[in-house]
Amino acid sequence: MKYAICNETFGDWPLDRALAYAREVGYTGWEVAPFMLTDDIVSFSPDDRVAYRKQVEEAGFEITGLHWLLAKTEGLHLTTMDVDVRQRTSGYIADLARLCHDLGGKVMVLGSPQQRNVPEGQSMESAMENAAEVIRAAVPVLEELQVQIALEPLGHEEGNFLLTAAKARDLQRMVNSDQVKLHLDVKAMSDEETPVPQIIRDNADAMIHFHANDPNRQGPGMGDVDFVPIFQALQDIGYDEWISVEVFDYSPGVETLVTESMENMLRAKASCR
């Protein structure tokens, strides 16, 4: 199994320090939230992109791709009835695909609940159609650059759109492109009635990325979720893409989150059949 860590985990740490610590712990993948790089991805120049990629790769990492795609943006939304906003959002996703490609990444995790939640009074049917339209418009760029979008189901605490893996699969079918697949997240799956290992098995044909965390918003194994059956399911389906640690509660401190997450994942993997 390949283990990655999301770059926002390190907060305001200098990049060289964050990379050195993560590599020492055992991570080899580096997942990027665009807002950690720049407030304006278009002005993040080709030279900036080359320099960032070079520093990460020379530290022993592969950049897996991007997540938090629409976070901390203004005037963008996935499901809105506003045509102009949808068109801008499609264009921005295409720009993100170019950034992802330039950094050497292959997968963009589409979560960002605030920029996709269904506005009051709008039907879920129209929201799904609008989201499919936005993503479909970016597909030619995704195909050209061989970058994939991984649709991320999120739980009820996060919003009201794509709350289950099944709904994400519905949207995937509506877009109907090999560049659009599925992302699964332990925290989010824990909100479903179906057990997490079963969700993994049910979606083995579509899952291209995976986030390890806990409903308590900390790292894998730092809450009540048993990761042994989860890692057993990943092993059983032959999943060989990245397992990336994404946390939301930073109160334990960077060192604890980064180190204990890895220790817990390795322990769970060692307990599999």
Image (tube, grey):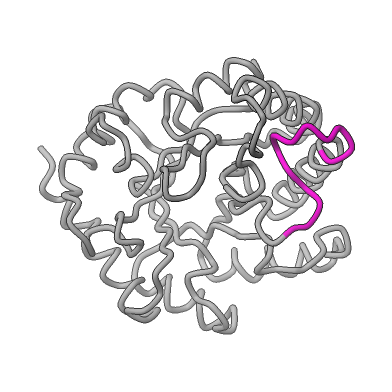
Q: Is residue 269 visible?
A: no
| Number of residue marks | 0
Quarter of the image that includes the C terminus? top left
In the image, taking residue 53 as reference, residue 231 lies left or right, namely left
Q: Main secondary structure of the magenta part?
A: loop
Q: Quadrant of residue 202?
A: top left
In the image, taking residue 49 as reference, residue 232 lies left or right, namely left
Residue 233 against residue 268 in the figure, above or below: above
In the image, taking residue 250 as reference, residue 123 lies left or right, namely right
Q: Quadrant of residue 24?
A: bottom left
Residue 100 against residue 248 in the figure, above or below: above
Location of residue 47 in the rendering, given as x and y in whole percent from the top left corner: 84, 66
Residue 85 against residue 3 in the figure, above or below: above
Location of residue 125 in the rendering, given as x and y in whole percent from the top left corner: 62, 19
- Going 80% across and 60% down the picture, which residue do you hit? 41
Of residues 100 and 20, the one drawn nearer to the viewer in this rendering: 100
- Going 59% across and 63% down the picture, which residue do you hit? 57
- Going 42% across and 70% down the picture, which residue do you hit? 23
Location of residue 117 in the rendering, given as x and y in whole percent from the top left corner: 60, 41
Taking the view exactly as shown, the residue that stands out farthest to the front is 121
In the image, taking residue 27 as reference, residue 194 lies left or right, namely left
Q: Is residue 52 visible?
A: yes
Please tell me whether residue 80 belongs to the stretch shown in magenta.
Answer: yes
Of residues 269 and 131, the one drawn nearer to the viewer in this rendering: 131
- The stretch of residues the image draws in magenta is 73-85
Location of residue 254 in the rendering, given as x and y in whole percent from the top left corner: 40, 79
